[in-house]
Amino acid sequence: MSDTAVLINTAVAVVAIVVLIVRFKLNPIIALVVGSCYLGLAAGLGVEETLTTVTTGFGNILGEIGLLIAFGVLMGALLSDMGAIRRLVEGLLRTVGPQRLPHAMGLTLATFLQSIFLDVLLVISAPLARAVAPRLGRYGTARMATALAIGLECGIVFTVPGVGALALAGLLDVPLSTYLVYGLIVVIPTVAIATTIMTFLFNRGWWKPELDELEPVTAAVAADTADTAGAAGAVAGSGGRSAAAGGSTDAGAGGSATIATGGGDAAGARPEPAPPATEPPLILLFAPLIAALLLVATGAVTEAVEWHNPVVALLSTPAVALLIGLVGTCLLGRRYMGQPKVEESLESGVRQSGQILLLSGVGGSLAATIEAVGLGEILGGYLSAGSWAPLLVVWAIAAVLHIAVGSVTISAITAAGLLAPVASSLGIDPVLIALAAGAGSLFLVHLTSNTFWLLQSLLGQTTRGTLKTCSVGVSVASVVALGPILLLSLFL
């Protein structure tokens, strides 16, 4: 088949996936499988080879990241039910004070809490953010809402074990330890700079409380909001946790309606367990997660210095490191919640991880099909090796897909799948392609995203206000992230 025919069929497959998700409200998992099968058949692979490619791609990607996603989600469920997130946000407020809280909370959400499911993070942290907003002055709601939006969305794609980060690393064959290190190099300045830019805009009068907030946050409202923080984990149950397509609240066009009307009280959600009578030190709760991430980072360091030790190599393997973290978190849960509540948390984590795993797997199916039809060689001839321009192309592809589909995770996975076959021919480190796809997938979080509607309802914003804090704020972060990514391309 000619190169032109392959390009046309690939474009048709991608457009068909978008239309099936957005127009016909088809589940993204089914849409990606249908698109993969169409591409294989239309490009002449034949029925048998197409099915083999789709199933093999599915199995390969889950073989790389399946356990990592499961372990991360289970750890997050346990930490949420032990009250670790609520206590961490309260501790940040005491430590840095209200004026520095937006930056501190954004960076913490983006870097430290990505094993926690995004719905849970948002629904637990948002009431606390709204309660402290009056202490930040006239633009407090705007600053806190923006910090939450930027921190949460950036963490999904840049920080291990964020679901998007795991999928991007797996699709592009990037060692997880490498993605962990470079993802942090990108996400920390991105969140800090983007939050600062948005604060500057708000302080120059861009935020109009009378138009951008549903009601001014008075001290009484703040107190009532703070009282609801402990119960905000209701969305962590079957309603909220299943809302996401691919592990985030940006499920796509079909999901926004359920959140827009229901706010944080998703139907069928289970209440957050009552806090234990004796709360353990906060650092103890997070110690297993910290240890796991340090082990993964150690693997990157030992690889860079070419030091080999079999014990260190075993413990720093991402699956082993996260398993150690999960076991440690389970032991803490048994000590401070009791075994029955640990089992309940783990069951909830298993339920929410199912769709995440399936979506990541079918993303691998699409990538394998694209590679099988030879798109990588074709695109490699158009993009010059060693240039930073291909990174902008990756960013633009992911941005367009996100605008169309409305899901950060789906657009990042699809963009990475399209470009994965090209990585070896471009002379660019695959980690840069993965990071660029992640950055582009953040562009213009809008009305089709559940994150948008959760931020609107939980922070008391109008749609106009949420367009400023969420849509513009995360788009600024998407563009800002290109800076450190392009700088890294000079050294990798």
Image (cartoon, rainbow, N blue to C red):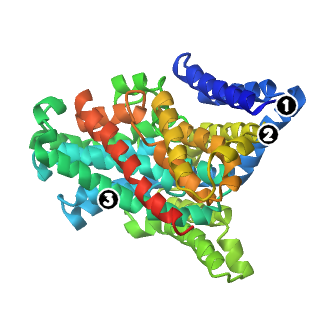
Q: What is the crowding at mark 3: few (fewer than 14 residues within 10 Å), some, or many (at least 20)?
A: many
202 is higher (above) or lower (below) than 55: below
Residue 293: mark in rendering: none
- Circle 3 or circle 2, nearest the eye: 2
Q: Which residue is mark 2?
A: 372
The residue that label 1 is drawn on is 45
Are circles 2 and 1 on residues that touch, CB within 8 Å? yes
- Left or right of 330: which side holds 126? left
Q: Is residue 41 left or right of residue 458?
A: right
Q: Disc 2 or 1, which lies upstream in sequence? A: 1
* Residue found 22% across the figure and 65% down from its top: 96
* SS type, badge 2: helix
- Residue 115: tell me if it is visible: no
Q: Which residue is mark 3?
A: 192
Q: Residues under labels 3 and 2: Cα distance?
A: 41 Å
Amino acid carrying mark 3 in the image: Ala
Q: Residues within 10 Å of mark 1 (few under 14, many from 20)?
A: some
Q: Position of residue 405 (x, y in %)?
A: 51, 29
Pick whichever of labels 3 and 2 is earlier in the sequence: 3
Work out whether mark 3 precedes mark 1 in sequence or the reverse, and give the earlier one.
Answer: 1
Rendered position, 230 above or below 106: above
Amino acid beneath label 2: Ala
Where does the image place residue 351, in percent across and percent down from the top left? Answer: 59, 39
Quick one: 202 or 242, which is closer to the camera?
202
Q: Secondary structure at mark 3?
A: helix
The CA distance from mark 3 to mark 1 is: 47 Å
Disc 1 is placed on an element classified as loop
